[in-house]
Image (tube, grey):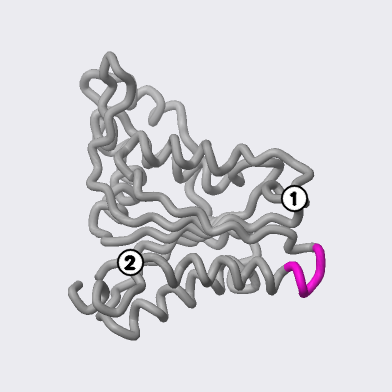
Amino acid sequence: MNVLFVNASPHGDASHGYRLALEMIAMLRKTARVEVVERDLAAKPLPPITRDYARAITSRHPDARQFDVSEQLIREIETTDALIVNTPMHNFTVPAALKLWIDYVLRIHRTFAATPEGKLGLMRDRPTFVIVGSGGFHSGEHARQRDFLTPYLRYALGSIGLRALHVLSLQGLVHGDEAVSESLRSAREEVARHALFAADDAIAR
């Protein structure tokens, strides 16, 4: 099994979501041989989108060299059986580092096609887990803010064909140890219920 782990948290291995992602990978390794590619968008930021890249996107005869970064990121997805993304919620939505990754991965004629009905994903679907860490609450009885991150990621990743998306919400991370423990407990239970982490399914892979 090949797993792509994309980290967008600037806290690195101090992030609760980062550590949860490692727990998930360890669970898979108990019953299957797992190869992991880690793309740390915070520790090794991607280069910004340039004018040349923007021109290549809209050109009928683009300079293929402009797509080197995009191709590498897309191939990392193409060669995986499962994708795990760890991201904080910054100002109600995705952090800049993850948005840049999305800008490179969503590429017309490569990962999606434009049709009269809208974008048609060209990538094979695969289990995708998005761990969302937030200091406050954006769902449930304690919610005090809007969540634009989850619907945006569902739409963006769905537009390239990644529709089997499962969101693991870690809320209230600045509200003390009890809130953190409860959030992690709930996320772990949700992970354990997914077929990918069931022993029979993992062995079959």
Of mark 2 and mark 1, the one earlier in the sequence is 1
Please tell me whether residue 165 belongs to the stretch shown in magenta. no
Bin the neighbour count of mark 1 within 10 Å (Cα to Cα): few under 14, some 14-19, many 20 and up: few
Q: What amino acid does circle 1 point to?
A: Glu
Image quadrant assignment for residue 29 = bottom left
Q: Depth check: 32 or 94 in front?
A: 32
Placement of the N terminus among the 4 image quadrants: bottom left
Evaluate if marks 2 and 1 touch, with contact meaning CB atoms under 8 Å apart: no
Does 166 sit above or below residue 192? above
Start-end of magenta stretch: 175-179
Does 156 sit above or below residue 184? above
In what element is the residue under mark 2?
Answer: helix
Q: Position of residue 178 (x, y in %)?
A: 77, 73
Q: Left or right: 42 with respect to 197? A: right
Q: Left or right: 12 with respect to 5? A: right
In what element is the residue under mark 1?
Answer: loop
Residue furthest to the left in view is 204
At horizontal 32% and vertical 61% (from top left) the residue drawn is: 82
Q: Position of residue 179 (x, y in %)?
A: 75, 67
Q: Position of residue 20 (x, y in %)?
A: 54, 71
Q: Depth check: 136 or 100 in front?
A: 136
Residue underneath mark 1? 141
Q: Left or right: 38 with respect to 188? A: left
Residue underneath mark 2? 195
Q: Position of residue 122 (x, y in %)?
A: 23, 37
Q: CA distance from mark 2 to mark 1?
A: 29 Å
Q: What amino acid does circle 2 point to?
A: Ala
